[in-house]
Structure formats: C-alpha cells, structure tokens
Image: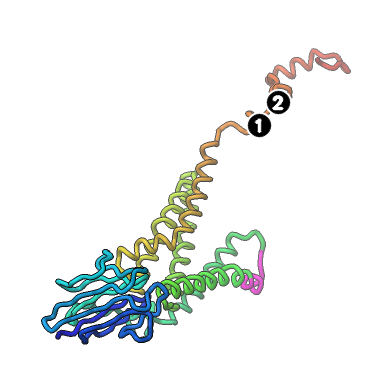
Amino acid sequence: MDTLILEIHTPGLHRYEVIDKPRIRIGRAFDNDIILSEPTVAPYHLDIIRDDDGHIELHNLTDVNPARFNGQAKKSISLGKLPIDIKLGRIEARIVLPSQSVADTKTLPGNGQSQHWFSHAFWGVLLITVCLIVSAIDFHIHSFTNYKWDTLAKLVARETALYLVGLIFFLAILERLIFNRSEIKPLVVVISLSYLMFQLITPLVAELNYIFTSHLPELLFDITWYAILMPFIASLYLIHIYHQKRSNSAWLAMLLCSPLIILSAIDVTQVLGYLDSFSAAANYHRDLSALNWQNDVTISIVSFIEHARLLSPGVVSD
C-alpha cells in the first residue's frame, strides 16, 4: 500500500499529513486521525478508505458544509488519479503522491546572510536617514522663512519620520494578517526607495508644468504613480519577498493600492472639472449687472481731455 500525502493549506505555512493506513478519518473531534480545528469543519467530516489493490475512496460524513472534491459536492468518490483538491468547510487541501514535484527553493530575504540586499538592516537605516535628509532639503527649499537646525530637525521628525514609521507599521500589520508573518527589513527598504523616488520625480514634474504652462504633466504623473507604478512596486515586492505567483500578486497589489488609486482619481477629476469651467474672460465680466459702472461705454484719453477743455471751471459734466 503506497503512502499518500494530505496537503492542508494554511496561511503562510502548509501542513502535511501522511496517509499510510487503510482508513483515515478527518474532522474536528479529538478522536479523528487528522484533526482540523476549524469551526466550519464537522466533528466527523471525511473518510479516506484504501484497499490492498490501491483503490482510494473518499466518503462525506456530514451534511453541513459537505466536502467538495475538485469543486463538486458528492457523497463519495473513487479516485482515478492524483492529485485531487478537497475543500472541508473553509479548509482547502489536496491529496498528492510523495513523488509530487515541489517548487524550487526561494531565496530567504531576511536571514542576514543572503546576497539579497533587502535583507540587511544597514540598508534600511541608511535609506531612512537619506529620506529624512531629502525631506529636510525639500522643506527648506519650499519654506519662506529661515529655520534653525533644531527647529528644522523637529519639523522633519514630525512630518517625515512619523509618516514613514506609520506606513511601515500599518503595512507590517497587514502582512501579518495576510501572510501570517512580517518582513520588516525588506519593507523598510522598499518604502524608503519609493519615498525617495517620489521626492526625486516631483521637482521634474513641477518643471514640466512650468515649461508647458499646464497641469497636464502633474495629472499624468499622479495617474501613472498611483495607478501603475505603486501597484507594480507592490507586485514586485510580493513576488520577490513573499514568493507569490505573478497572477496573485497583481490583483493583490491592485487591492492594496486601491485607496491611493481612488484618492488620486478624485483629485484628477476635480482638476479636470476646474479646467472644464475655465474661461479666458475674467469672472467679473460674467457676473456684473448692467447697473455697474464698469459696463459703461468707455472713451479714449484724448477724447476725455478734449471734452474737459470745453468745460467751464466749476462745471460738472453730465
């Protein structure tokens, strides 16, 4: 009787159980051969029965959240080939042969010994320091008053440092909820690089606005940054740090960046609304009534002087 493997999918780390007996019972009760502590799993959920000839049968033991085999709910099924996907309540699993091929070993980014430069705390500290320096320079250039070094340091610490720490803290919690682990050092490096990239591109966009005397470069940059570049960076992070599949990382990156995309779309819509209502004529030309003196017919300066010469002293013209 060949040994089989039950692969149980759990967030971040799969669980594997050996099936080497004629009968294996799966459920939430403690007297099962394989115990699944999931509320949607029945006390006795599934039987895996094997005979000496190698035939395998799966039998549903519950009517509540019945097991689904390759997406279909059946009372029982005879296996013709492996692997087969099984769903027990919210638990996803599959039965495979021990000879089932596994994926290549992925580089561990956080072990401190890998050549992956995201794994070193030195780069994270260095990049955070550079972010603070760049923020101080940007704040000094765009300020209208002179600040002392201690005042400038306080402003940078309050504005940039709190922003970066808050963002890192929030994303670390999100990683823990989604992947059941957090990679702090790679996260710090990626956030710092993204911040520096944004700070370097923003002045170039401002120069393009000046050259073209238009806000169109800024609008295009906002759309590109929040709807394309940020999801692309997040997708690369998920692929290389958490080793997610490309298809999964793409939609997950879009989901994570969706608040930024929505806010950017709202800002772009508002700016376009302003452009639609723009007119070369000043607002007062459209708003003044016929009673305003600005709407009276004007005369040239020469005509005014000639008319003034004809007036007697002390006489007011109508």
- x, y percent for residue 108: 33, 81
Q: Please say if 275 is above or below 286.
A: below
The boundaries of the magenta stretch are 146-154
Q: Residue at x 34, y 65 (%)?
A: 249
- x, y percent for residue 208: 46, 50
44 sits to left or right of 308:
left
Helix or strand or loop: what does disc 2 sit on? helix
| Quadrant in the rendering for residue 180 | bottom left
Helix or strand or loop: what does disc 1 sit on? helix
Q: Depth check: 317 or 18 in front?
A: 18
In the picture, the quarter occupied by the C terminus is: top right
The answer to if 127 sits in the magenta stretch is no
- x, y percent for residue 302: 70, 19
Q: Residue at x 30, y 85 (%)?
A: 33
| Quadrant in the rendering for residue 115 | bottom left
Q: How is the image coloured?
A: rainbow
Mark 1 or mark 2, whichever is nearer to me: 1
Q: Which residue is mark 2?
A: 294
- x, y percent for residue 105: 26, 80
* Three-letter amino acid code at the position of disc 2: Gln
* Three-letter amino acid code at the position of disc 1: Tyr
Q: Residue at x 68, y 20 (%)?
A: 300
Residue 163: numbered disc: none
Residue extending farthest to the left is 53
Q: Depth check: 22 or 262 in front?
A: 22
Q: Which residue is mark 1?
A: 284
Q: Depth check: 144 or 100 in front?
A: 100
Of labels 1 and 2, earlier in sequence is 1
